[in-house]
Amino acid sequence: MSLLQVEGLQAGYGQAEVLHGISLAVEPGEVVVILGANGAGKTTTMRAVAGLIGRRGAVSIDGAALPPHDPGAAVAAGLALVPQGRGTFTKLTVAENLLVGATRRRDKAAVARDIERWYEVFPALGRRTGQAAGTMSGGEQQMLAIARALMSRPRLLLCDEPSLGLAPQIVRSVFDVLRQVNDDGGTAMLIVEQNAELALNLASRVYLLEVGRVVSSGAAAELRDSDTIRRAYLGY
């Protein structure tokens, strides 16, 4: 049984429908990447799966249906979202942001250990534990957003454009951490990413979106050899 199963997903904003029946799956421990041009519906897919916007179609975790437009139910089922544009609580400190990520947890000692763990993984956060998130650089805020999401110990991490606006060195560090989290803890991931080279190196499977529809899917190694992927996303 798939960890995440999405069938016939339709969603949009107001009268404008963006997604036209998307179906996809993520298996336990798997990293799946969604590729697509701007406007393809990638962010809308992530927001609909996370319950942030209304939707039609079926979204389930381990076969149990998630109600639409209910992000609390998604979090309770083991999902955590790193939204596009970081999405930190800018007026809260680094430490407070991390505690927000652990709101549903009751294991205080383990929460404290996890905070220290992310300070070790992202030393910049440890040096700024009492600093307001909004005063940090974009790269530091992205690190915080990822750490905050992982504080809930999710079974499935949704990452929307984790490389957006970051310097190349920071991007590589972020993807190294995502790989480590997947390797060490088996956390499954669904990632939207414009940097196809990094995404294909991390992913086991890929879905290609065009105008709100899945037009291709398969193993990352196979799609890397696709002429369409190479021309559109890899530049050769």
Image (tube, rainbow, N blue to C red):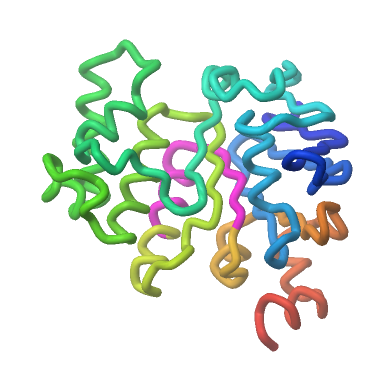
Say above or below: 183 vs 51: below
**Disc count in the image?**
0
- Give residue 13's position: percent from left, percent from top: 73, 41
Quadrant of the image occupied by residue 45: top right
- Give residue 122's position: percent from left, percent from top: 25, 51
Indicate left or right for 196 with 166 as reference.
right
- Residue plotted at (78% across, 58% down): 209
Assign the N terminus to one quadrant of the image: top right
- The magenta region covers 176-192
Say above or below: 79 vs 190: above
Residue sitting nearer the eye, 191 or 86:
86
Indicate left or right for 170 with 21 as reference.
left
- Residue plotted at (26% across, 49% down): 134
Residue sitting nearer the eye, 217 or 214:
214
Say above or below: 24 vs 100: below
Quadrant of the image occupied by residue 52: top right
Q: Is residue 107 magenta?
A: no
Indicate left or right for 151 with 74 as reference.
left
- Give residue 165's position: percent from left, percent from top: 43, 67
- Residue plotted at (78% across, 34% down): 6
